[in-house]
Amino acid sequence: TAMTDTTSTRTSSKSYGPPRCVFALLLGSTFAMGIEYAILMPTVWRYVQSVGGSQTYLGILLSGFSFTRTLSFVFVGYWSDRRPMREPFIFSFLIGAVGNFIYGIAGGLNSYPMMLFGRLIAGIGAANTTLNQSYIARTSSPDQRTKLMSLCRGCAILGIAAGPVLNLFLLRLDDVHACNGRFCLD
């Protein structure tokens, strides 16, 4: 089954790794995290300014994400050692999506506290990056491990490279000014 801890007897002469569908999911989530980073970093300062925030607010916003992410590494690691890894992975993925949604709507609500809350929650969700690496380490043979971890890291870098392309697309939305109540897509 996907994202379960498989500890069956394996010989060191065999090459094994995570199931392809699970590995594709890991690569996809790593790619998405790279895109998130590449879209957020060039836009976060203007976004903070749009709600009246200062450079201090920007620093708190960025460090808050890293702080909750770091704390969450311990929690999801502990959880994944005791339960099937799919549980903390799905939890972190969903909580990250919720956090990013809250962060996204905070500008329309002109709320820096909501913006900060969204980034803190997204930081909890970002702990899934450690799950990706630990899952590869648990399910791959020593001769495959470096290759699979490099592929995973490569997807993060590709996501970071793809983010600016998506930002170019999103810049075109400035001309659209699509608003629905308090939420504006521009």
Image: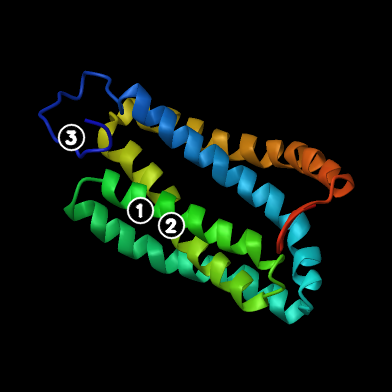
What's the amino acid at mark 2?
Answer: Ile
Q: Is residue 33 above or below residue 111?
A: above
The residue lying at 77 percent from left, 57 percent from top is 43
Q: Label 3 sits on what residue type?
A: Thr
Of residue 14 and residue 131, the one placed in the foreground of this image is 131
Disc assigned to residue 95: 2
Residue 52 appears in view: yes
The secondary element bearing badge 1 is classed as helix
3 or 2: tag closer to the N-terminus: 3
Image label count? 3
Q: Residues within 10 Å of mark 2 (few under 14, many from 20)?
A: some
What is the C-alpha distance between the residues marked 3 and 1?
20 Å
Viewer-nearest residue: 17 or 63: 63
- Residue under pointer 1: 91
Q: Is residue 46 left or right of residue 115?
A: right
Return the residue at label 3: 6
What's under tag 1, amino acid-wise?
Phe
Residue 115 image-quadrant placement: bottom right
Please tell me how crowded label 1 is: few (under 14), some (14-19), or many (20+) other residues with Cα within 10 Å. Answer: some
Pick out the residue farthest to the left.
Answer: 9
**Mark 3 residue crowding within 10 angstroms, few (<14) / some (14–19) / many (20+):** few
Q: Residue at x 18, y 51 (%)?
A: 83
Which badge, 3 or 1, is on the more N-terminal residue? 3
Mark 3 or 1: in front is 1
- In front: label 3 or label 2: 2
Question: What is the CA distance from the residue labelled 2 to the residue labelled 1?
Answer: 6 Å
Above or below, 40 against 28 in this view is below
